[in-house]
Amino acid sequence: MSIRIENIRKSFGDKEVLKGIDFTFNTGSVNMIIGGSGSGKTVLLKCIVGLLTPDDGKVYFEDRDFHALSKKEIRSVRRNIGMLFQSSALFDSYTIFENVAFPLRMFTNWGQKKIAERVHDCLERVNLVKVDNLLPSSLSGGMRKRAALARAIVMNPKYLFCDEPNSGLDPETGQVIDRLIQGLTTDFEMTTIVISHDIKSVLDIGDKIMFIYKGAKEWQGSKDEVLTAENPNLIKFIKTSGLM
Amino acid sequence: MLRQMFNFSEKFSIYWSDILREVISNGMSSIIIVIIMSVFIGAVTTVQTAYQLEGSFFPITTIGSVVSASALLEMAPTITSLVLAGKIGANITSQIGTMRITEQIDALEVMGINSTSYLILPKTIGAMFSFPCLIIIAAFCIHLGGIVAGTASGIITHADFLYGASRFFQSFYVTFMCIKAVSFGFIIATVSAYQGYYVEGGALDVGVASTRAMVYCCILLVIADYLLAKFLL
């Protein structure tokens, strides 16, 4: 259930944003893509889930070339994907319950009772209670992130993608979100990809890490190796975070 | 976009409630403005037609005929649709555009949902159902406005007005009005949705897209109006 990318390239006009990236994202572990703002992390994630089409290179989900699949097959692969967006991307006009129940209503024939049970399970899992009838606009940033995470896991996905899950959150709430992602990955044996520029989060939950600098992969390794890495751009990136 | 819209793999039952919600919301949110506008259009047309016919050899019942025929053939479907282009069209563009810039459409796609079908199909079908209803109400209110203004100002009695309206009435006028209503509903929903779906940038760009959608809708409406009249009348 791993995801493999090969020589991913993407340009916007004359600007080359991704310069041939190869990587294998392991199952049951938190794979982190780190790098500064504008380094191409989000573009890479969007290429992996097919929201953007790479100019060159391949993305394999369990050895199936994702971008060579038909639209119907792509949709069927995506039903195994849960994604936590940077902006949470909850549906404004739906309550939190309806947001989390949404994938179940679309893709299962479950009755109201079973859907409600599953939704409440997921909301409890992310420590959200008594928010069923609230609209996303009435929640705090951290609660919205947790509700979005509940929606992402409600279908028991094989793959979980998180785009800067703790951006805009205070350190304590950010850590809560990180722990949730780590716990869910381990418990459900998911292939999780997290984009972050928060080095504390990397050291906390990152099992396998890729560092991107100006669209190119500069370094990869484990969280134990990050602080002893000899890549000058990575050292500079860590230093600016105040950890060295 | 149109081809993608009908290429859905989700259960169609999901769309029923959304279509119904669109029909109701379009209808309920626009009915007051349609009634007010139509009553005054009817009143103004009656007064102005009477002014034009003053001293002519045409019988007074002609006012009813003119107001009725112009209401059914042109004013109810076209003017109402132009107003609805501004109201419903801009609403569709801003709704879908906001969903685009806040990554809600990306969220739908990542879930494996055809976002074009899910967002645009119910709005299009909803508009194609609600427009005829609103336009029939508009036609009724134009007649009502004509009768009220005519009798209140002593131009024509309601009996003469109704006699004039029924004298040259053809049932095809109503069919033609409904064909226009369905066509205009389709144009407004799809053009507005297209502008919202492909918006890029931020809140400012959603506003620009809404304005652009309204301009395109108005132009396409008058072109479609001419073509329908040319080929169906």
Image (tube, helix red, strand yellow):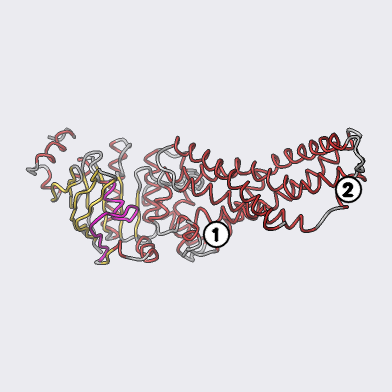
Q: CA distance from mark 1 to mark 2?
A: 45 Å
Q: At label 1, which amino acid type do we have?
A: Tyr
Q: Is residue A64 left or right of residue B199?
A: left
Q: Name the residue: 50% across, 48% down.
A: A94
Task: Provide residue A215's location: percent of width, then percent of height.
Answer: 20, 45
Task: Provide residue B8's location: percent of width, then percent of height.
Answer: 48, 63
**Is residue A156 depicted above or below A237 in this figure?**
below
Q: Chain of mark 1?
A: B
Task: Provide residue B22's location: percent of width, then percent of height.
Answer: 60, 51
Give the number of the disc on residue B15.
1
In front of the other: A121 or B97: B97
Q: Name the residue: 40% across, 57% down.
A: B111
Q: Name the residue: 26% across, 57% down.
A: A186
Q: At label 2, which amino acid type do we have?
A: Gly
Looking at the image, tell me whether mark 1 or mark 2 is earlier in sequence order: 1
Name the secondary structure under disc 1.
helix
Q: Is residue B138 left or right of residue A8?
A: right
In front of the other: B130 or A117: B130
* Crowd band around label 2 with a 10 angstrom C-alpha radius: few (<14), some (14–19), many (20+): many
Q: Which residue is mark 2?
A: B164
Q: Are marks 1 and 2 in contact (CB under 8 Å)?
A: no
- Quarter holding residue A82: bottom left
The magenta segment is A42-62
Reply yes or no: does residue B120 show up in magenta.
no
